Amino acid sequence: MPQDHGFHRVRITRVVQETDNTRTYVLDAPFTYRAGQFVTVRTCGTLRSYSMSSSPDTDDELMTTVKRVPGGLVSNWMHDHLEAGDVIETTRPAGAFCLRETAVPLVALCAGSGVTPILSLVKSALATTDRRVRVLTANRDAGSVIFAATLEELAGRHPGRLEVRHHLDDRRGLLTEAELREFAGGHPGADFYLCGPVPFMDLAERALLSLGVDPGQIRVERFTPAPDEPLGEERDGTVTVVLSRKRETVGQHSGETLLQSARRAGLTPPFSCESGHCATCIARVTEGEVRMRVNDALEDDEVEEGWVLTCQSEPVTPHVTVVYED
Ligand SMILES: Cc1cc2nc3c(=O)[nH]c(=O)nc-3n(C[C@H](O)[C@H](O)[C@H](O)COP(=O)(O)OP(=O)(O)OC[C@H]3O[C@@H](n4cnc5c(N)ncnc54)[C@H](O)[C@@H]3O)c2cc1C
């Protein structure tokens, strides 16, 4: 497995309690990264991705911010067990939820922990461009707004450039499509960045599309993988998956990725972003050929060696064998 996609041991230098159920972990990690990217943490025998809340343009330290998810394995373990001085394993930063070079306004719509990559983007946009920035956060109540003080302080330092609005459910009820349209309207040429729970993202995307925003101007970061598409038609051919000394073969279905085939075969392959950015699902094709829909993680020479992102790879030959490294 290429070293670049391996895990690195990094020390936690500080832990900051942001709200009752949200903590920032300041990492002593020598990584270069872009605003909006994430690292993938390996712990509890599994993998979870966490976005940077710091900006490479304004912060000396690298920070990830984690909100407890009720019943969730890793977020609760991190909150309950990790302290300054502890060491965790993470990948290098990855992800494509980043700024592009442009002067158009940036409009960010986020909810809950979705503010994490948004804060990173906002800090970088303010520090490195003259762009106007508008941020809408949606939360249950004032106590659950993450980074309220940081955003207020940034708005104070950039008057006329940064506008922040907090929607609080306990005051105004659940956020509506009309409120999102009202906030986002008036900036037809802006870049829009969306991050939050699935229902929030769906609502925000609907609101923007109904305003006539070009889908190419909408960037989304999904914290929860999109549900698998229903199984496509069965076709001739097989996919053989080798994982943890198990070898399983299933028939091919049109439109199915190697990751989906592996799951259908009853295996539990590694994955995280499911959008071709993080390389957590990397494996090597040893027989046959595949086509990757998106590849934002592997270099050309790695692809030539047979490495693929299984979440993005569809077979193009009748028999494909894919091997996950232990
Ligand atoms: C690119 C990316 C960036 C991210 N950035 C951040 C970030 O910056 N900050 C952040 O806080 N999060 C972020 N996330 C989300 C994060 O990776 C985790 O998904 C989140 O912390 C929950 O993980 P968990 O292990 O605590 O919960 P999980 O154990 O995965 O559980 C999630 C939910 O499923 C339920 N559940 C679990 N098992 C079962 C079961 N067997 N049956 C029914 N329900 C079940 C749990 O009760 C819980 O509600 C990001 C995700 C991605 C993909």
Image (cartoon, grey):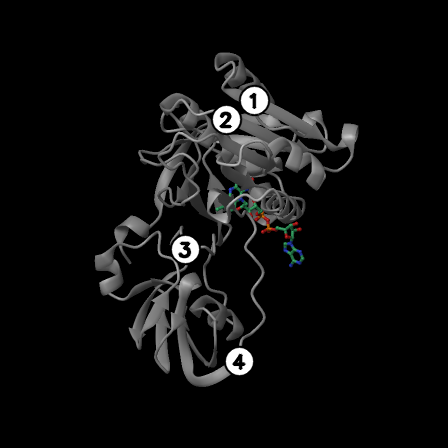
In the foreground, 88 or 218 = 218
Q: How far separated are the C-alphas under marks 3 and 4?
A: 24 Å
Q: How far separated are the C-alphas under marks 2 and 1?
A: 6 Å
Q: Amino acid at mark 1?
A: Glu
Percent x, y of residue 294:
38, 58
Residue located at (60% from left, 28% from top): 146
Element type at mark 4: loop
Choose the circle earlier in sequence order: 4 or 1.
Answer: 1
Q: Amino acid at mark 2?
A: Val
Q: Report if the CB atoms under discs 2 and 1 are less than 8 Å apart.
A: yes
Choose the circle earlier in sequence order: 2 or 4.
Answer: 2
Element type at mark 3: loop
Q: Which residue is mark 4?
A: 233
In the foreground, 315 or 30 = 315
Q: Which label lies toward us, 3 or 1?
A: 1
Q: Which residue is mark 1?
A: 163
Residue located at (37% from left, 83% from top): 318
Choose the circle earlier in sequence order: 2 or 1.
Answer: 2
Mark 4 crowd level (few <14, some 14–19, many ≥20, 10 Å Cα): few
Element type at mark 1: strand
Q: Which residue is mark 3?
A: 276
Q: Which residue is mark 2?
A: 133
Q: Which label lies toward us, 2 or 4?
A: 2
Q: How far separated are the C-alphas under marks 2 and 4?
A: 46 Å
